[in-house]
Image (cartoon, rainbow, N blue to C red):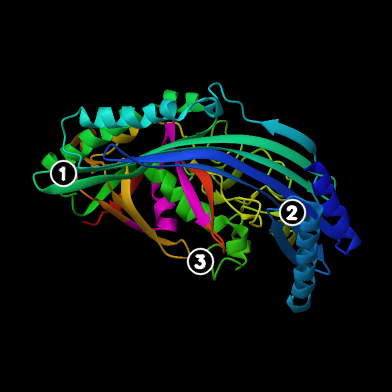
Amino acid sequence: MEDLIEFALDLALKMGASYAEARYQENDGMNFSLKNGELQGVGVTKTSGIGVRVLLNGGMGFASTNLLDKDAIRSAVESAVHLAKSASRVRKEPVEFSEEEFHVVKYEVGMKKDFRNAGFEEKMEYLKRIEEEVLGTGIQVPMRYLAYSDWVEHRIFANSEGAYVESKIPRVDVMYNLVVVEDGQMEQAPFVSTAFTGGLERIEEAKPWERARKDVEVLKDLITRGKKPPEGTVDVVIAPEVSGIAVHESVGHPYESDRIFGREAAQAGESFVKPDMLGERIGSDAVTVIEDPTLPGSWGFYLYDDEGVKARPRYLIRDGIITEFLLNREYAKKLGTKSNAAARAVNYDREPIVRMANTYLAPGDHSFEELVEGVKHGVLIKSFNEWNIDDRRFQQRYIGREAYLIENGEIKNPVRRPILEITTRALWSSVDAVSKEMEFYPGTCGKGEPMQGVPVWMGGAYARLRDITLRR
């Protein structure tokens, strides 16, 4: 692969490119699923190829191939150069990249229990364990969809400015979708994932079967004892699953620089954030939102992005103030700064675009118990079944799944489907306290055209929101 990558870079420069990069990626893994205890299918996947991107006369071109020989690489480079020339003739302003410090580095995420050495039956035991725990409750769960997947991403990135980054990142995911029926009513725990970078030891430590059993018991309790949420103005405590989806949707996405500058408008939406909003207050002093690809074991983990830039924690909001956007080299240049390594591509045949990795509400000084004790009349929303947000990421609503009434600092009976409908600015301005405790939840974030779904974590701390009007 190194010879082919070097060939691609040399050829692109000979054809007139001012900049060239080549990225090899191989994905190798297994997946299977159960529905109501019956095997639905087993998949073994392997993809590999090289993507080439060039700059020429201010235009950018990208092409790829899954044929790993010099003839195919030559064709890909010629296509990328042709596209860059065409783009240069119609662009109003040239594409330029920020100047960066590049490294020659190799890194790999280790596995204490390597899933490549485990057979199908051993992996199936994780789903069977979930099935046993759920059925062992005696609760009616007529729809049980369980799935397992693992794969290793092997990437090699090099560019004409001296970068060379090789990485091997294993990922493993166990997911369930459960429907509980009781007294003619239905509640659902939809597509709940336990996912990490690392080996099977991560799944065994997380014990998703215990969470599945608890989810089933919570859903039955919600059906049998759940009441309507309180009316009027109340305080709300949101748990990490809810604060996580909120920071992902209302902070992470609108802080993506390609959205801010309008590239994403026709594909995934716009942003209420403008370049001159850096330094503007968007929330209370209690709110700090961090975007960090380097969290060990995280679903969105990487140490170098797909432009060869070294990753670091990105403080999107610090003490309520907008401090940083998610940047690749193109938009860093527009803002006169350095990239913060937010360029990601899901595979060799996709160009790297501005993406999140692990977005979370940073911890504060309070315990969860202190947050609840400070609520006279309110609701604790621990998880959600539905979320909606407009394409500018400003108006949003979250519909709770597991939620409870809080009276005089004590957690009481379950409440059914409390609806938090609020603007982004009002949401983060209403936070008066944040917990020390943190949790993370995996997801697949979709963006781009053609679509790219990349692994991400969402979560962080519990947060207390004052004077909120919940909807029913």
Residue at the spot 87% in from the left edge and 57% down from the top edge: 11
Q: Which residues are magenta?
A: 421-446
Q: Which residue is mark 2?
A: 337
Q: In the shown orientation, is residue 317 left or right of residue 54? A: left
Residue at the spot 66% in from the left edge and 38% down from the top edge: 303
Q: Nearer the viewer, mark 3 or mark 2?
A: 3
Q: In the shown orientation, is residue 215 left or right of residue 161? A: left
- The mark that comes first in sequence, 3 or 2, is 3
Q: Quadrant of residue 58?
A: bottom right
Residue 167 is situated, as x and y percent measured from the top left of the image, at: 69, 37
Q: Which element carries disc 2, helix, strand or loop? A: loop
- The mark that comes first in sequence, 2 or 1, is 1
Q: Residue furthest top?
A: 112
Q: Relative to the observer, which residue lies in front, 28 or 164?
A: 28
The disc at residue 181 is 1
Q: Amino acid at mark 3?
A: Gly
Residue 96 visible in rendering: no
Residue 248 is situated, as x and y percent measured from the top left of the image, at: 48, 50
Asked if the stretch drawn in magenta spans residue 435, the answer is yes
Q: Which residue is mark 3?
A: 269
